[in-house]
């Protein structure tokens, strides 16, 4: 019975959990691009460090806190929306070149 349960757990973890994660990652890449998808991987590290400190009582030294701040700061920079571009100035119309025949003095006609 234990072997059946272990195989069932393996199938559920492999198919359901990993399949769901791949599906979500594909949606993020399609919607926001690969840079946004990469931030998910970095945030998993931050969550692991925070949970390790809170749940397991692991020590959080200065370098861990600085690294967490750096990852969060980079994530904010990557996820922010770009400022809208200023409207382009419309150039003034340039008069068309006048052919040499049309430039002759019209009043000189008899």
Image (cartoon, helix red, strand yellow):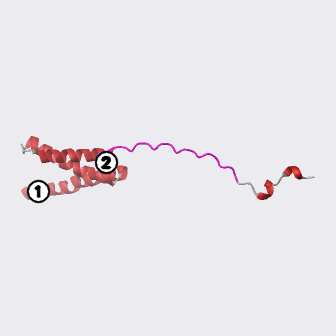
Please tell me which residue lies in front, 14 or 90: 90
Residue that label 1 marks? 6
The image shows a total of numbered marks equal to: 2
Q: Quadrant of residue 62?
A: top left
Quadrant assignment, res 9: bottom left
Question: Is the residue marked by circle 1 packed among few (<14), some (14-19), or many (20+) residues within 10 Å?
Answer: few
Which one is in front, 83 or 79? Answer: 83
Q: Magenta includes 65? A: no
Q: Please state the horizontal and vertical placement of residue 79, each as a whole percent of the image.
A: 32, 45
Whether tag 2 and tag 1 are in contact, CB under 8 A, the answer is no
Horizontal and vertical percent position of residue 83: 40, 42
The residue drawn where x is 64% and y is 47% is 93
| Residue that label 2 marks | 78
Tag 2 secondary structure: helix
Between the C-alphas of marks 2 and 1, the distance is 40 Å
Residue at position x 21%, y 52% from top? 17
Q: Quadrant of the N terminus?
A: bottom left
Badge 2, how many Cα within 10 Å: few under 14, some, many 20+? some
Q: Is residue 48 left or right of residue 27?
A: left
Q: At which x and y percent is residue 90? A: 57, 45
Circle 1: element type: helix
The magenta segment is 77-96
Pointer 2 or 1: first along the chain: 1
Residue 1 in view:
no
Front-most of 26 and 5? Answer: 26
Secondary structure, magenta segment, majority class: loop
Closer-to-camera residue (101/28): 101
């Amino acid at each position: 019975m234990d072997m059946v349960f272990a195989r069932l757990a393996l199938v559920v973890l492999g198919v359901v959990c990993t399949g769901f994660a791949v599906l979500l990652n594909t949606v993020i890449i399609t919607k926001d691009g690969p840079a946004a998808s990469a931030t998910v991987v970095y945030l998993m590290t931050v969550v692991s460090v925070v949970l390790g400190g809170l749940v397991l009582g692991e020590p959080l030294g200065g370098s861990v806190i600085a690294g967490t701040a750096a990852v969060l700061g980079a994530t904010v920079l990557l996820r922010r929306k770009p400022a809208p571009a200023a409207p382009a100035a419309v150039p003034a119309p340039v008069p068309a070149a006048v052919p040499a025949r049309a430039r002759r003095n019209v009043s000189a006609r008899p």
